[in-house]
Image (spheres, rainbow, N blue to C red):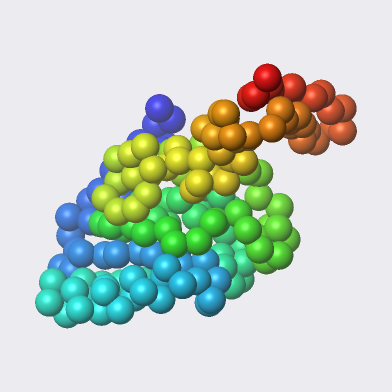
Amino acid sequence: MNPELELHLDAIKYKRRCRVKPLVRIYMGSFYNNQWRRFSVFLGSFEAKYNLEVEVLNIQDVHERRMTEVEFVEYLLAADIHFIFGHVHQGEKIRALQWNMETLKDNLYRLKYHNGFPTGVEVQCPVFLQDKMAYLIALDDFANPTLRIDLVENGSYQALSITIQE
């Protein structure tokens, strides 16, 4: 691991140990996110009882702060618990930041052992990552034969044919 990154992560761990209140950081996505609305009611009952400090980040905040993919994940990792309630890569404001989706995906895997949601195998869930081809492969007998074309920056496309059903 990069020595500078190790020092940065050690500093984050130290800050966590020095906190009086556990810090919960939440990415809610858009203001119209139904999962977030339901969870916020639930969280409200725990916030005072367990003396939690809660920070909520929405798509507008990410855009205004001009966060990178790495900064977004580090923001969540700096908390004691994280929750993601929206697809991080969706929306006009995020598109304007020109995030690289592979970089985002690689960084989201860093949440694998962090407290919150998603963690563990949920970080690799095709629904969370919106991997439509994985959906089709999982459906196997119920899907039509499908053609997948990976998008590349230089514009030279190659089709990867995946026959799901004969």
Splitting the image into 4 quarters, where does residue 95 fall?
Answer: bottom right
Which residue sits at x=28%, y=57%? Answer: 81
Q: How many marks?
A: 0
Q: Residue extending furthest right? A: 155
Question: Residue 134 occupies which quadrant of the picture?
Answer: top right
x and y percentages locating residue 27 in the rendered image = 45, 64
Q: Nearer the viewer, residue 97 or 45?
A: 45
Residue placed most toward the observer, 143 or 44: 143
Most extreme residue toward the left is: 49
Vertical relation: 8 (above or below) 96: above
The residue under the point 53% across, 77% down is 31
Camera-side residue of 63 and 133 = 133
Give me the residue at 57% from left, 29% from top.
141
Q: Is residue 102 visible?
A: no
Rendered location of residue 38, percent (x, y): 36, 74
Q: Quadrant of the C terminus?
A: top right
Side (left or right) of 81 relative to 38:
left
Q: Looking at the picture, how far across and down is residue 57, in whole percent?
A: 46, 69
Q: In the rendered image, which quarter contains the N terminus?
A: top left
Query: On the picture, is 49 further left or further right than 115?
Result: left
Image side of residue 75 versus residue 113, left or right: right
Residue 125 position (above or below residue 47): above
In the image, is residue 165 above or below residue 4?
above
Query: Can residue 122 be seen by looking at this rendering?
Result: yes
Q: Residue at x 50, y 61 (%)?
A: 86
52 left or right of 76 in image: left
Where on the picture, by quarter, is residue 16? Answer: bottom left
